[in-house]
């Protein structure tokens, strides 16, 4: 049996494993499902929402990535992130007390920005690693009548996207391969702007998730991470047993992301896109949700609509529609493994 590629395990494999090995507990409202960003547990008067995510692509400001990527998984549930745990696996022969303190400082700063408490974790020097690995876990709460899932999209809904793509991917390329990007013809100022995407506009989707949920009854939200916007669209559609029709010309592709991806032969739609938020809302409320996001300082664009499941997930351009591209491996992962 051939080895699996670097990155997320294929959705088909996960579905089979979930069906075979994951029985549902009596208080589990949402358990492991492809496309769902966080578990939901019934605590009586409210729901506890829990997630875990590792940081494996980036090495620069990993602590900040870990906090915000995990918080995003709760934001798309309509939940308030409250408590964070971090496991730091640090490479033998490279780790100093100063570098460990730097990670702790990054985590503390990011937690402070969103009102989250660091409540535990584990830190060790691990043999066999060539770079640090940070694994985060985030817990939060949501009122039972305010829960949002990936599976809630309905035919006729409008599909919205905040900020632009691939926000996180552009930041990673600029920070990890910036010098090479310049040698490949990307202007230095483009690389410099993308390097700052981690902070400006930032990879947190908490502001727009809160704004959207305050403006309307959001049917579904999803966080485009590995596999980029294209994979997020497939996941949202499959979770809700619906189709999607996305207008390619309406997708806000960041200029910096497009330039950096093109320099390395990557597709921006298949590149990790944390920092953007994918939403499905009633057609009558789409403009109001977009305006609420804009009022919170976050750009928001209607990029398509939810259709019947029989229509599939399509990408329309120039009046023609074709199947949305599929990315079994994130483009960033492919870049790092293939060079």
Image (spheres, grey):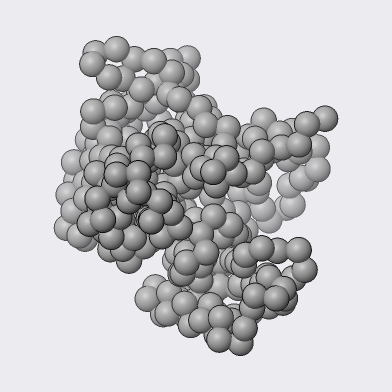
Left or right, 248 with respect to 106, comes to left
Q: Position of residue 296 (x, y in %)?
A: 21, 60
The foreground one among 270 and 129 is: 129
Quadrant for the N terminus, please.
top right
The foreground one among 11 and 93 is: 93
Q: Position of residue 304 (x, y in %)?
A: 30, 29
The foreground one among 331 and 55 is: 331
The foreground one among 270 and 159 is: 270
Identify the residue at image location x=68%, y=70%: 91
Q: Is residue 23 above or below residue 329?
A: below
Q: Is residue 92 above or below residue 44?
A: below
Residue farthest front in this picture = 183
Q: Position of residue 324 (x, y in %)?
A: 43, 24
Q: Position of residue 204 (x, y in %)?
A: 38, 61
Quadrant for the C terminus, please.
top right
Identify the residue at image location x=49%, y=56%: 73
Identify the residue at image location x=66%, y=38%: 5
Q: Is residue 291 visible?
A: yes
Q: Is residue 292 visible?
A: no
């Amino acid at each position: 049996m051939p080895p699996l590629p670097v990155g997320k395990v294929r959705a088909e494999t996960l579905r089979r494993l979930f069906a075979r090995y994951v029985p549902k507990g009596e208080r589990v409202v949402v358990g492991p499902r492809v496309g769902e960003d966080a578990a939901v547990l019934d605590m009586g008067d409210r729901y506890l929402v829990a997630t875990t995510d590792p940081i494996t692509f980036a090495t620069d400001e990993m602590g900040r990535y870990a906090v915000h990527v995990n918080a995003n998984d709760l934001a798309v549930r309509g939940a308030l992130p409250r408590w964070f745990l971090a496991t730091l696996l640090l490479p033998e022969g490279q780790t100093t007390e100063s570098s460990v303190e730097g990670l702790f400082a990054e985590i503390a700063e990011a937690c402070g920005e969103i009102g989250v408490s660091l409540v535990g974790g584990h830190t060790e020097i691990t043999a066999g690693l060539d770079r640090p690995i940070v694994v985060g876990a985030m817990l939060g709460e949501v009122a039972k009548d305010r829960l949002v899932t990936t599976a809630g999209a309905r035919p006729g809904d409008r599909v919205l996207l905040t900020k632009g793509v691939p926000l996180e991917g552009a930041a990673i390329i600029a920070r990890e391969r910036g010098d090479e990007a310049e040698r490949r013809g990307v202007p230095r100022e483009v690389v410099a702007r993308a390097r700052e995407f981690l902070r400006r506009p930032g990879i947190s989707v908490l502001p727009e998730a809160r704004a959207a949920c305050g403006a309307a009854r959001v049917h579904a939200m999803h966080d485009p991470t590995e596999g980029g916007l294209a994979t997020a669209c497939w996941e949202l559609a499959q979770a809700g047993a619906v189709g999607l029709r996305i207008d390619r010309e309406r997708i806000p592709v960041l200029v910096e992301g497009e330039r950096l991806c093109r320099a390395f032969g990557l597709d921006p739609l298949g590149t990790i896109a944390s920092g953007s938020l994918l939403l499905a809302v009633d057609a009558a409320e789409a403009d109001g949700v977009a305006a609420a996001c804009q009022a919170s300082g976050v750009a928001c664009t209607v990029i398509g609509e939810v259709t019947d499941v029989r229509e599939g997930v399509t990408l329309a351009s120039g009046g023609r529609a074709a199947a949305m591209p599929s990315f079994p491996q994130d483009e960033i992962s492919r870049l790092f493994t293939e060079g």
